[in-house]
Image (cartoon, rainbow, N blue to C red):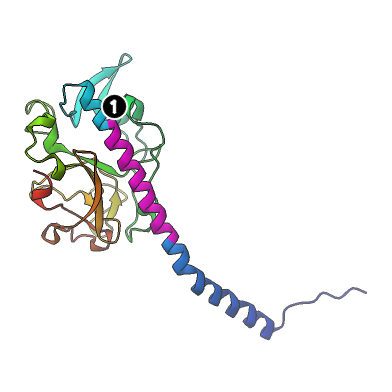
Amino acid sequence: MRKNHAFTLVELLVVITTVVVLCAVAAPAVWGAYKTSSLAVSANNIRQLAAGGAAYLGDNNYRFWPYRRDGEIGGVKGAIWWFGFEPGKSLGKPEGQRTIDMDNGPLGPYVPRNITPDPSFGFAGTPFKPKYKHGYIGIGYNVLLAGRNGWTTGGGPPLRYWDLPNPGRTVVFATAAQVNTFQKPASPRKPMIEEFYGFDDDRGKIPSVHFRHNGRAMVAYATGAAGLVPMDESGKDRRAPEANVGRLAPEALR
């Protein structure tokens, strides 16, 4: 007759102890790999956007693109964001159910389709709330380049590259996010982090630069160069301090 062999209590404790030790040893390596992956993804996305932006400028009299405008593509009305086209039927949908066509924004023809979601949203210390159904890019655009009232149309045409007093110190793109406390499932007691698509130096607006890389944001300058810059601590979003959302120093935007 065949007997079933079960773990003894001692054997079970040895197995559990071994697993705990292995997890403790592996955790720093896994965490380091995640951070390295996040940095690589941000670098790739910034590089692709910077190259696409430079190509766009060359084809458009070196004038920057608008942040958002109402328009129509293929007979469909909607919002033409700098990063893609959102059909009108999507605009009223709940967060996380909206759709975006990244091929039809101003930079669509200039940016390859290998921009990938940044994994850092998954371990920012604050729950992630998606805006769109089909991924995210985690990068924002300096709306001061989009005209006098860059967030919307009607404030004047976008600036030209040659209008910039110091292109090498003018940030065009930066890792971006927003702390959301006002749209479900987020609330004031349960702040959530979501991607965001623009930033400026208006101290009255919600901070939207994401310093996701050890307290630094990855940025691309008007010259195409990229780098990591620290936060202006006076502009940190204190509703979720662990998320590292804040502002760039004003001199980085002008």
Q: Is residue 92 visible?
A: no
- SS category of the residue bearing label 1: loop
Quarter where residue 109 is shown:
top left
Residue 112 versus residue 249 in the image, above or below: above
Quarter where residue 110 is shown:
top left
Residue shown at 41% from the left, 36% from the top: 114
- The kind of residue tagged 1 is Gly
Q: Is residue 127 visible?
A: yes
Coordinates of residue 15 in the picture (x, y in percent): 64, 77
- Residue 46 versus residue 84: which sits nearer the camera? 46
Residue 5 versus residue 46 in the image, above or below: below
Q: Residues within 10 Å of mark 1 (few under 14, many from 20)?
A: many
Q: Residue furthest right?
A: 1
Coordinates of residue 123 in the picture (x, y in percent): 37, 58
Residue shown at 80% from the left, 76% from the top: 5
Residue 227 versus residue 15 in the image, above or below: above
Coordinates of residue 126 in the picture (x, y in percent): 32, 58
Q: Which residue is mark 1?
A: 105
Residue shown at 11% from the left, 37% from the top: 144
- Over which residues does the magenta segment extend? 33-52
